Image: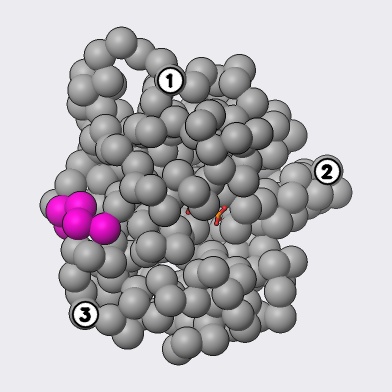
Amino acid sequence: MKIIVVGGAEDTAKVAFQEIKATLKKKPNATICFPTGSSPLPLYKAMVADFKKSKTSYKNVVTFNLDEYKGLGAKHTQSYRYFMDTNLFNSIDVNKDNIHFPNGVIKDLNAECNRYHEELVNNHRDIQILGIGSNGHIGFNEPGTSFDSVTHVVSLSASTIRDNSRFFSSIKEVPKQAITMGLSEIIDSDKIILIATGINKAKAIRDCVKGPIDENCPASILQKHDNVILILDKEAASLL
Ligand code: GLP
């Protein structure tokens, strides 16, 4: 694992964006899988600012996203699709037909998981970008999830519901379930970039990097991959 410790959130964006740009230069039709959450937000801001200034094109880029809440549609302001549309997709020239997203409002969620899995099988990722939960989850793969998992429906842990309640007006509004890419799909990417900032992530980062490769820390699966970059601020790196 390559670990890059930077001064703050804005700097995580600079480093991550350099990686994306370098890939796009070599491969303008790269497939990139994105996370949501506060950690990648500075990166998305940097991508939008650069698009306005330098016109880096995403026309041929194929995108995937890690996860979506059950029951929240694209127009719901807390859905992950809405987050991606408003923070990135609507502000760059990505072709809407190239955007792949799990649909959390479909009746048959298991069929939706199978559909998404097939799309992932047919579109190998060049870059997987990740955040990390304070309990070591990646995507919505909570501790105890099988390393062999593929896209599935999850029941969110109490700590994830609590962590994510900051985006909702009350904890009661946080969906209890979600669709997430599985761990075997997350590591099926040429390069993985994980961004973590803040003291709340320090323990998860320590377990991810230094702990045993164990399903109790889903992010520890990254130790099995030979092209992983962790971009951390000092607080997130403080227990390394
Ligand atoms: C959610 C998402 C994860 C994300 C995590 C951390 O649970 N499903 O993909 O990595 O939150 O979010 P944040 O970056 O806001 O701390």
Indicate the amino acid at tag 2.
Lys
Residue 212's tag is: 3
Q: CA distance from mark 2 to mark 1?
A: 34 Å
Q: Nearer the viewer, residue 6 or 199?
A: 199
Q: Quadrant of residue 4?
A: bottom right
**Mark 2 closeness class: few <14, some 14–19, many ≥20 residues within 10 Å:** few
Q: Nearer the viewer, residue 49 or 30?
A: 49
SS under mark 1: loop
Residue 223 shown left or right of residue 162 in the figure: left
Which percent across, then down, holds residue 186? Answer: 31, 52
Residue shown at 43% from the left, 76% from the top: 203
The magenta span reads 143-147
Q: Tell me: residue 225, above or below residue 146.
A: below
Which percent across, then down, holds residue 37? Answer: 57, 48
Residue 71's tag is: 1
Q: Tell me: residue 213, above or below residue 32.
A: below
Q: CA distance from mark 3 to mark 1?
A: 35 Å
Q: How many marks?
A: 3
Which percent across, then down, holds residue 131? Answer: 49, 58
Instruction: Look at the magenta stretch and give its main secondary structure.
Output: loop
Residue shown at 27% from the left, 20% from the top: 109
Within the magenta stretch, is there residue 145? yes
Q: Is mark 2 within 8 Å of ligand 1?
A: no
Position of the C terminus by quadrant? bottom left
SS under mark 3: loop
Q: Quadrant of residue 190?
A: bottom left
Q: Tell me: residue 194, above or below residue 82.
A: below
